[in-house]
Image (cartoon, rainbow, N blue to C red):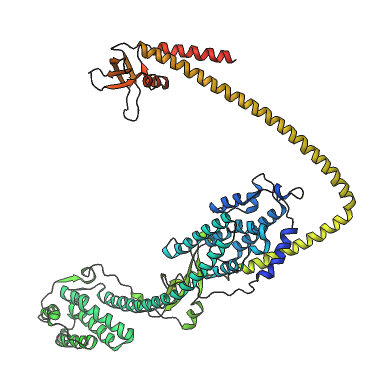
Amino acid sequence: MSQNRQRPKDVPSVAAVSGKIDDVLAGIRVPDLPYPAGKLEPDAVSDWRPLLVSCWSEQRDERVTHVIRSVHLEWSARQVNAAYVADRIMDVFLKTSGLHPSLARRVARLRFYLAWRMNLEGKKAFSKALLEWLDSLQEWRGWSDSGGRSAKVLMDQLDSLVIAVSASFESGKTEPVNEFCHRWQEDAGKRNAQVGKLRQRLLETEQGAAKQRKAEQSSRALIGRALQGRKLPLPIVRFILDHWQGLLKQSIWDSGLDGENLRHGSKLLEWLVWIGDPSLSDKDRNRLYHVGEQIGDRILDVWKRVFNESLPAESLSGIESAMVSRLRGEAPDLVEALPAAGSFHWDSTWLSFEVPAAEAFEPYEGQWFVEGEGVGEQRRYFYAFLPESAEILWTNGAGVKLGLQTWGEFQRALEQEQIRPLPQLTPFGTVLAETVELLARVCEKQRRQREQAAEAARLRAEELRREKEVAEERRRAEEAEREAELERQRQADEEQRLADEQAEKERIRKERTLLAEKQVDAIKLGGWIVVEPDETSDEPARLKLAVRINASRKLVFVDRLGLNRREFLEDALVERIVEGRIRVLGTSAEFDDTLSRVVGRIRVGRN
């Protein structure tokens, strides 16, 4: 995708922008950003790496300044400025890069990484490897978010960027990102070496296909024009379609539409139609005899000249029979010529299109064009003009065919602004240099204003600062003491509440267990229980006690028919009754009533 690549006008070196970046990070102040009230101690500054990692991993399109403003944490002025500078650079990049919006948006998410690195190391955030990689994205100026395989290649590579930046956040080092940039450049070199071969192969293939298409479509147009509206004997129609169309196609392939063989072939096609259509040939019987005597030899002669071999004798048998019938004056069986040909599609424009002059299409060759708007826009590369078919070969710039378009359709699309040339791209280095230069001027202006204001109010500010520091310290101490006391009180209340809730739960469970044990002890042989539905059953099961084994404390239940045997240990049965999965019939109402009274007494006792 490197053809027609634009070289940056002024790609700045790291040295050219580094000093100004550091000045901006240290000195600029932007209204409405969450700057700290004063200079924070290092241990008071919030660690924003987890927040930035989360935004990057989720691939969010928010500004860093919006993110840090949305959480109530203490940020240093350098963090705020790093966030602002990263946002400003990437916002300008989104507007002016000229890359597809989907691609530019993916790259602009690096704002989280750049903000983090600028806060830590200032000018070193823009390493040489990173700048070269960002500038190299111009190679993808023609990329479109089409969802196809070639479009997905870039998205897969950018997925690797997500992994590399996450690894950099995790390790606290820039090596993963720099390694990604180096690998990208290496892959680009290999890809460009392959692209040249793909483009040449595609051009040769499409030039041959255009010539083949011209021969095919032009021969069909000649036959369609000759057969349209005619009724002919079926053998003549079959000969034209099965044999003569191939001769016309080969003649056009060999010599174009002006060749001698095509002229003879077209004339014989007209004579075949004239002989076969009584409405044409019956008006001149003498001429019919004359043409009928010669047409067979003429057909064989032209066939021999085109294919350098003789036409099989059986191929002429059908039309010979039809011509004999016509010469005898018999009324032949006629069919509609084109319907008899089946689904025969033809386009007469192939016989009349004009190839534009080279100066008309050459300025467009090697240029990128855009169709659509926003993230839905599609970009295509005017790779070559195919004069054989007067068509434009559109590619994705990397040797992959996107389609063909006639020259007329292209001109209409330009006039109606359905397609437009891709504007010049702005390299990232230029975006960086211009943005930092502008911010540096603003920073310098603010610095001078601050110096003037500071000089005028220095003494008064010093006194106010001391008073404010004392009041602030006292307020913080009182606030801390009050918060500590409130926290102790909240902790005590919470511990008491948890203890009361736990005691109440234990008391209720003990009461339920005692009642359940009484129920189990009171079940007599033949007593009924109801087992509530579980994952193995959709309906409750009514079972009666068949056997009580005191030695093993086991109770055996069966259904009404004495089947569906179920065994429970007394403790397990008690546990299930407490949990509500089993009810004992006959005493459950008493159990529920007793339980309600117990719970009521507990609540009254607590109140």
Identify whether 493 is placed above or below 72.
above
Identify whether 222 is placed above or below 597.
below
* Horizontal arrangement in the rendering, residue 511 relative to residue 32 (left or right): left
* Horizontal arrangement in the rendering, residue 289 relative to residue 106 (left or right): left
Whether residue 566 appears in this view of the structure is: yes
- Outermost residue on the front side: it is 551
- The x and y percentages for residue 425 are 58, 69
Identify whether 570 is placed above or below 363.
above
Quadrant that contains the C terminus: top right
Residue ID at (47%, 15%): 511
Identify whether 70 is placed above or below 539.
below
Whether residue 416 appears in this view of the structure is: no
- The x and y percentages for residue 399 are 43, 73
Query: How many marks are shown on the rendered structure?
Result: 0
Which residue is at the front of the view, 249 or 439?
439
Which residue is at the front of the view, 559 or 218?
559
* Horizontal arrangement in the rendering, residue 132 relative to residue 488 (left or right): left
Residue ID at (39%, 19%): 574
Which residue is at the front of the view, 52 or 416?
52
- The x and y percentages for residue 604 are 56, 13
Residue 147: which quarter of the image? bottom left
- The x and y percentages for residue 131 are 60, 67
